[in-house]
Image: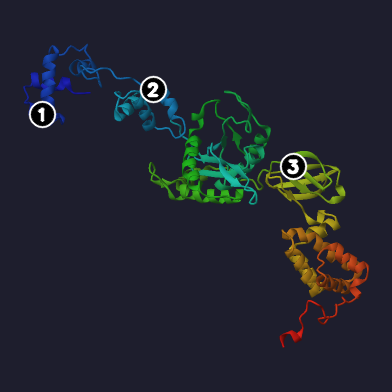
Amino acid sequence: MREVREVMRLHREGCVPMREIARMYGLARSTVRDMIVRFERSGLAWPIPPEISDADVEQRLYGLAGVKPGRRKLAEPDWSVVLREMKRKHVTLQVLWEEYAGEHPDGYRYSRFCDLFRGWEGRLPLTMRQSHAGGEKLFIDYAGDKVPVVVDRLTGEVRDAHIFVAVMGGSSLSFGYATWTEQMGDWIDAHNAAFAYFGGVAHLLVPDNAKVAVIKACLFDPMVNRSYTDMARHYGTAVLPTRPRKPRDKAKVEACVGIVERWLLGRLRNKIFYSLAEVNAAIAECMAQLNDVRVVSQFGKTRRQMFEEIDVPNLLPLPADPWVHAEWKLCRVGLDYHIALERHHYSVPHRFARREVEARFTTRTVEIFLSGERIAVHMRGSSNGHHTTIPEHMPSSHRRYGEWTPAKIREEAARIGPMLSLLIEKIIEGRPHPEQGYRSCLGIIGLQKRFGAERLEAAALRALEIQARNYPSIKSILEKGLDKVPVSKSPERAPGDHANIRGSKYYH
């Protein structure tokens, strides 16, 4: 607000020079002169009547703000559309102004466009600034973007990992954790990891109204998932979901999610991960930089320092054991003595094939029960269609076959004798693909049980001499006893007389 009344009082009643008025109010002398001239031209009487406000006086002297006399009115953007577009990913005022300038080349310039938008935005409903006591609330959410993980090195199959984010209300100490899904098992596992990271439990957990946390959203009395409630009771805390469609209730974690996506995902965009463990190791390294190194300019401290001062003294202690969420599923063991669970196959002892069993699985383990007795336990595998097999669960015949490797085949052949070892190498080298010869080699080595190592070595020698390099030929040699018969060599024949042979006399 320009000091029109005071300037005119000093000029009219005090007869103070313009130079002195300018010095007193920190104005340029030209500005004071212009103000006096405008007042004289406005037709206002002195003293100015008290019913005329300062805003009215300024409008009489200078007109409406931002409107120059005689200038045509420019095209006004729809600011509500601008605000809605600003909430979309990667959209800035610069982008929206360029689109506006493309439609209205004679419209507002960029700086004026931004000023008008900020002025319009300032008239929107006010937001309440929230303050959070130390250790009071832990805000929880999942980031919108995901991290690709290669789950099969051979096929290159890629699966997205979801990023769980938790942030302390008092200090803004942030935690990130990768899970395969956003289902209850991974949700509980991520909470356990967060509590271990913070070294304690906040008095309230503040998630949004996701189905994994809230069965039925309600403004006054939301219905929280029973498993989630049991977990909170185990840790001595409580769940306080945000109001439906009110993201500002958890603005702290919404802001943290944005920080994590910019700070974390941008740094991981060019890296290739082959397991969740690798992703979480990279996340922990990035979050350490955010929490322990980066200084919050508003407070002049790192998040870790504020956490130690504000949150740590008020956190609830961790219980002796973390909460373990488990699910049960009724399965039938297949002919291959494996059960299928979440697109992965787990073995049971082969004597239980075709039996109906119960599988109890958590995010880390799979336990298989028959009539209440545990018959197998495995580490949880990823849902990639592969199988996890314990050798002790296999029949002896399957186990022996499964234990045969190319190295072991060569080792066993060398143990029997050098001729058999050479024959095995010839068989493997003579096939288009080495694996095509493995079964034939296994069959030949298996003949030792029936005929003995000495006869098998002799049969290998005869097979090499007659170029017989397959299982049926070796078996036939042994069954017919040809391994005991030396290979007959055809005698060398001297050149005989023939009409077409010139003979030695020809050269005389």
The kind of secondary structure element at disc 2 is helix
- Classify residue 6 by image quadrant: top left
Numbered circle sitting on residue 79: 2
Amino acid at pointer 2: Trp
Q: Mark 1 points at which residue?
A: 29
Residue 459 versus residue 84 in the image, above or below: below
Q: Of marks 1 and 2, which one's residue comes earlier in the chain? A: 1
Model colouring: rainbow
Amino acid at pointer 1: Arg
The kind of secondary structure element at disc 1 is helix
Q: On the picture, is 239 further left or further right than 5?
A: right
Q: What residue do we see at 80% from left, 41% from top?
A: 358
Q: Gap in Å between the C-alphas at discs 1 and 3?
A: 85 Å
Q: On the picture, is 145 further left or further right than 370?
A: left
- Classify residue 33 by image quadrant: top left
Residue 99, given in percent of the width and then of the height, sits at: 38, 28
Q: Mark 3 points at which residue?
A: 341
Q: On the picture, is 264 further left or further right than 384?
A: left
Numbered circle sitting on residue 257: none
**Dot 2, crowdedness within 10 Å: few (<14), some or many (≥20)?**
some
Q: On the picture, is 361 further left or further right than 311?
A: right
Q: Gap in Å between the C-alphas at discs 2 and 3?
A: 53 Å
